[in-house]
Amino acid sequence: MNVAPRCNFPSFDATCGSLDFKSDLLAGWESVKKFCALPRQISRSPSTRATTYMQAGAEYMHRMSELLKASVNSLRSTSLMDAPEETFSCVLRLKSMPVEEGIRMCPGSGDSHIFLPESSGDDLIIELQDIKGEHRGKTVVQLASLSDEQADRLRWWSVYNDRDQASIGKVQLFISFTIDSSASAMNKLGVVSETLAYDIVLEAAMRTQQFGPGNLRLHGSWKWLLSEFALYYGVSDAYTNLRYLSHVMEIATPTADCLLLIYDLLYPIVSVQDQTSLSRQEKRILYDMQEQVEQLLASTFENYKSLDSSSPSGINQSLTPIAGEAAPALAPAVKLYTLLHDVLSSEAQTMLRNHFQTAAMKRCKRHMSETDEFVLNNNEGFLIDSLTTASAYQKMINLCNNLSDEIKTDIKIHNEHILPSAIDLPNIATGIYSVELCKRLRSFLVACPPSSPCSPVIDLLIATADFERNLASWSLRGIKGGVDAKDLFHYYIVLWIQDKRLGLLEFCKLDKVRWTGTTTQHGTSPFVEEMYDRIRETLIEYDVLLNRWPEYTVSLEIAIADVETAIVAALEKQFADVLNPLKDVMVPKKFSIQYVQKLTRRRTLAIYSVPNQLGIFLNTIKRLLDVLRPKVEAQMKTWIACLPAEGIEKVGFGERLNEVTVSLRAKYKNFSQAIVEKLFDNACMQRTTKLKKILQDTREAGGESEIRDRMQPLSSQLTDTINHLHDVFSVRVFVAICRGYWDRMGQDVLQFLETRKENRSWYKGPSYALTILDDLFATQMQKLQGHSLQEKDLEPPRSVMDARSMLSKDGQMNTTNSSYFYF
């Protein structure tokens, strides 16, 4: 057992001599020391001897005063000359000592100090400082290079500048070595030989009991032997705990048993407020152990979700599912941290908070590693096939769910009240997870932009929104730069709606319209049916999105309104050939004589027959108003109903759809009235079918039979027309056109009566004519439609009711709304 290095230099005395910066030995004082008085030969008589002594004493005092005066003057002049020179001091300490325990000495003062080196490998460090305490240079004395010879004790040592290691002067030291075996010195030194012996016994005990990570505590006879050995040889309890702790820290792992043992070993030492009783060796070991314990605690806190006592390192390196509760080692770690730090101080809280932030960042990076391939290659839109895209989006969905589970676990750990109250673990972790997830989502959406709200994209949107909603439900809000699902997807949602609008408008172009002349089972245009099938698919596609964020309903409404307008425009272009003849009738009647003559010539060419294509057009418009568009509006209203009543989006909803509705109703009414006018013109082309002419030619004495005979051609024409309308139009359009035609014929009778108000003799013929018209229209409509008709469909229209009112005895006009005419 080599213990010589500890015993060779147990102590030494260092006396600071002088600096050669000021070699100023005072010659005056040396002269005083060297002065001596030489005795003269004097007589032996008492009187003479007394006189001689007095004279010699006076002369001695005279010379002494002169020498003293000269010396004082010399000292004064030397002092004045040396005044500008700078005064230096030295700070001496051992290499094993803390810097703050250095000993300050002044050169030439003769001060001395006893240092206690721990081994022969220790060094003596001399730092040179000026009068202001600023560092000027230093020198290092290696104790192993010194000898205990008398001639080697007083030596000059060069002082070097720290910057360029240039010599700036010398310092003279007197160093002597002594071996002090007193009890006080032994206690101060730490009983070197006994502590070394204790270390040997401790190592033997650990080898015998197979000391290791799974067996950290000594027990049985060896534990008793170590206790008795330390007690007998005076090894302090602090040293035994620290030496045992040093062996523990060599194999320490972040497990509950290890952390509890460390706490038990440190508590008796750290809990003592006054640590002056510790030797230098014990202080050094304690300082080293505290650093190692801090590193162990940092590793524990920075892996608090990966702690696993079954793992050799105490940390499970794989990203396994979280247990949902705090690891057993976390509570002892917090207890040990509280022992070493004042958890009420902001510095300790900040340090602990940083550890948990580091832990969250490590977990976050490990979760995000599976999506690194999608954001680190800097290739926007590199996903080309749907399978790869779906896989990428699924990984991002898993990332959102995993980070949400991480925060949920942090909440559970926080609710176990293990951590100090100042540490809000859920908010600390959320600040990392939410911000990093937002960055990753933004980068991912740039690298893999979603082209439409397809299933993988909607699933990611839902996962992102759920993550944000979970944070809100857990009262974890206000994370700057955190996940905002709407902000992340807003640009893409607007782009999707715009792309969908442009795509549907592309289908509405005239060169894209197909099925000209064909009909569906409803007698409508297949083009319109297909377009509204696409609109319904769009609503289904956006259903999940708009249920989450109904404020986008207004944007979708505007797009659909534009598409509906384009559908009607394309439909009009498709059926332009059959609509153009009706537009002449729809033009207001304020025209020149030439236009009236032109219009008259057109009407005399041929009898107008409603084409089948016109029936398809009107049937389609009617189906749009009654079936297709109400379904679209109803779906949108379910979304918009989720908005607050005072919301801007809710107030503005419906404006564009209403515009389309008004436009469609106007087109339907105008074209229906134009058809009625065309049919009425057919009846006016010949004298035998013109109702006014028939009424004019009927005599007053003529009865109902005469009127029927005269109206027979007109009745035949009306019957043929109604049958043709039934073949062309759907039920409701057929009813509307028939009632419109019925009303127009009634207006002709009413006008005839109004021109003959003063001559009531003409009233009998119009009365019969109205009866014939009512029977004809009601009978034919009921015959062709049967039970499809409603009761009000067979009621006489308003013009007929007004005419009958004129024919009544009181002559009052009917003002009821029992009859109706709707287009």
Image (spheres, rainbow, N blue to C red):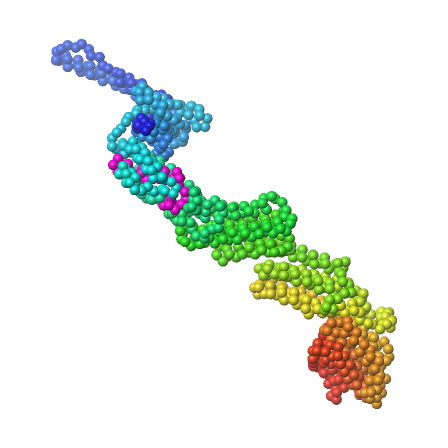
Q: Identify the residue at image location x=41%, y=27%.
A: 137
Instruction: Report the residue that reaches farthest toward the bottom.
Output: 701
| Quadrant of image for the C terminus | bottom right
Let me know if residue 245 is in the magenta part. Answer: yes
Residue 105: where, in percent of width, then height?
33, 29
Q: Is residue 379 above or below residue 453?
A: above
User: Residue 12's x, y, as percent?
Assistant: 31, 27
Q: Based on the displayed image, in which of its 4 quarters is residue 188 positioned?
A: top left
Which quadrant: the N terminus? Answer: top left
Q: Does 580 sit above or below residue 9?
A: below
Decide if residue 106 is in sight here: no
Up-down relation of residue 380 to residue 598 (above or below): above
Q: In the image, 201: left or right of 734?
A: left
Would residue 493 be found to the left or right of residue 591 on screen? left
Horizontal and vertical percent position of residue 524:
73, 67
x, y percentage for residue 245?
35, 39
Q: Residue at x 58, y 55 (%)?
A: 459
Q: How many marks?
A: 0
Q: Which residues are magenta?
A: 231-260
Magenta stretch containing residue 790, yes or no? Answer: no
Q: Would you say 591 lies left or right of 177 here?
A: right
Q: Give the main secondary structure of the magenta stretch.
A: helix
Q: Is residue 513 visible?
A: yes
Residue pictured at 55% horizontal, 48% vertical: 439
Horizontal side, residue 56 vs residue 712: left or right? left
Residue at horizontal 52%, vertical 48%? Answer: 367
